[in-house]
Amino acid sequence: MKLLSRLHLTAIAAVVIMAVGVGVAVAGTQGHRDLGGKHGVRVGKHGHDGKCPHGRQLERNKATVVAYYTTAFNDQKPVEAVAKYGGPVYIQHNPLAADGFQAFIDFVTSFTKANPQLHVDIKRVIAECDLVVTHSHLTLNPSDRGSAVADIFRLNRQGKIVEHWDVIQAIPATSANDNTMF
C-alpha cells in the first residue's frame, strides 16, 4: 500500500476546498434574481432588498419571533399571537400546512387541544437581515423525548412575521455520540 506524499495530500485538500467553495457559491445564487448595481445585490423570491436591519431592529425581530412562538404554542393563544405579531400575509413552506394565518391558528388550536401539555423550549435565536431562526426542543408532554425543531421566520419592514419554514427531527432513544441535539 503506497501512502500519499504531503504534497499530494495538500493538492487533494486544495481541490476539495475549491470544489466545496464553488458548490457553496452556486448554491448561494439559486432562486435569486440579480438587481445589478455596484455590489450586484441579489434578492430571493421573497427576500430582502439588500438593506439588512442591524442592532436594535434585529433584536426587535428576534423578540417578535420568540413572543409569537411562545404566545401561540406555550400560552396556547394563536389568535393573540397572530394579532400582535403577524403581517399582512403568511407564506408557509411546510408542505403539510396551508398558507395564511387562519390556517396557522386552526393548526395550533387543534394541535394544542390534542396535546395540552405541549411545550416549546427555545434554545437559540439567530437573526440575519429579515430572517430569524429558532432552534427549539418541542415536547408533547413531560415524558416525551420530543423533537428538535429549526424554524425560519421572515419579517417585513414593520417587524411583522410574513413567512415560515421549518425542519423537525424526532429525538432518538440512542445516539452515535455523547452530544445532545441542543
Image (tube, rainbow, N blue to C red):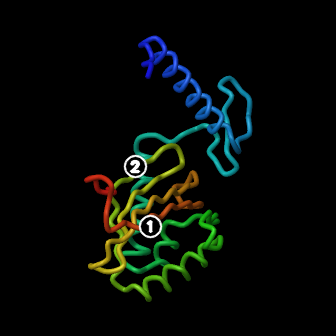
Residue at 47% from the left image edge and 77% from the top image edge: 78
User: Against 140, is 18 above or below?
Assistant: above
Q: Quadrant of residue 174?
A: bottom left
Between the residue at mark 1 and the residue at mark 2, the CA separation in whole angstroms equals 14 Å
Return the residue nearer the eye: 55 or 26.
26
User: Label 2: which residue?
Assistant: 59
Task: Say whether disc 1 or disc 2 marks the residue closer to the N-terminus.
Answer: 2
Q: Position of residue 17 (x, y in %)?
A: 52, 25
Q: Amino acid at mark 2?
A: Glu
User: Label 1: which residue?
Assistant: 68
SS at mark 2?
helix
Q: Amino acid at mark 1?
A: Tyr
Q: Quadrant of residue 101?
A: bottom right
Q: Is residue 104 left or right of residue 55?
A: right
SS at mark 1?
helix
User: Against 7, is 162 above or below?
Assistant: below
Q: Position of residue 151 (x, y in %)?
A: 48, 59
